[in-house]
Image (spheres, rainbow, N blue to C red):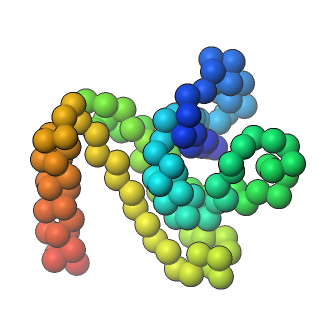
């Protein structure tokens, strides 16, 4: 499946066109998060959708796109494939988790829970 990460809101017409083409879209992604995902997947960040910009763009590769629920909100889990150009991404294996909650305090609770879980997993490996 193809995935488009967009830092802005897409129009209904754009969503319909993407859906008809088999492209999943995630809107309102923070620019820093979009750059991290692009790096992990070996993709270029596109500043606009002009055909001249898109022609030479490197598309990233992912092995899996999975819709998930996190804190009552929908999210997409993206599993990166091995980089197509190892020289470009010198063995980068990145995983980004965006934690969102109704308040900053709840976001902190979720983030601490994730960090503790990752520490347990790291110690077990």
Could one spot residue 16 in this view of the protein? no
Front residue of 46 and 118:
46
Q: Is residue 73 above or below residue 4?
A: above
Q: Residue at x 69, y 50 (%)?
A: 46
Q: For the N terminus, give its image quadrant.
A: top right
Q: Residue at x 52, y 34 (%)?
A: 27
x, y percent for residue 116 = 13, 62
Front residue of 120 and 102:
102
x, y percent for residue 48 = 72, 43
Could one spot residue 99 in this view of the protein? yes
Q: For the C terminus, give its image quadrant.
A: bottom left
Front residue of 119 and 100:
100
Q: Residue at x 31, y 31 (%)?
A: 73
Question: Within the image, what quadrant is residue 123 found in?
Answer: bottom left
Q: Is residue 62 left or right of residue 85?
A: left
Q: Residue at x 65, y 36 (%)?
A: 23
């Amino acid at each position: 499946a193809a995935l488009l990460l967009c830092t802005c809101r897409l129009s209904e017409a754009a969503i319909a066109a993407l859906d008809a083409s088999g492209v999943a879209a995630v809107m309102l992604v923070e620019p820093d998060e979009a750059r991290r995902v692009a790096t992990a997947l070996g993709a270029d960040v596109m500043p606009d959708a002009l055909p001249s910009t898109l022609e030479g763009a490197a598309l990233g590769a992912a092995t899996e796109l999975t819709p998930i629920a996190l804190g009552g909100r929908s999210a997409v889990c993206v599993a990166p494939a091995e980089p197509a150009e190892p020289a470009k991404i010198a063995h980068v294996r990145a995983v980004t988790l965006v934690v969102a909650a109704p308040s900053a305090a709840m976001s902190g609770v979720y983030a601490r829970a994730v960090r503790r879980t990752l520490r347990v997993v790291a110690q077990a490996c």
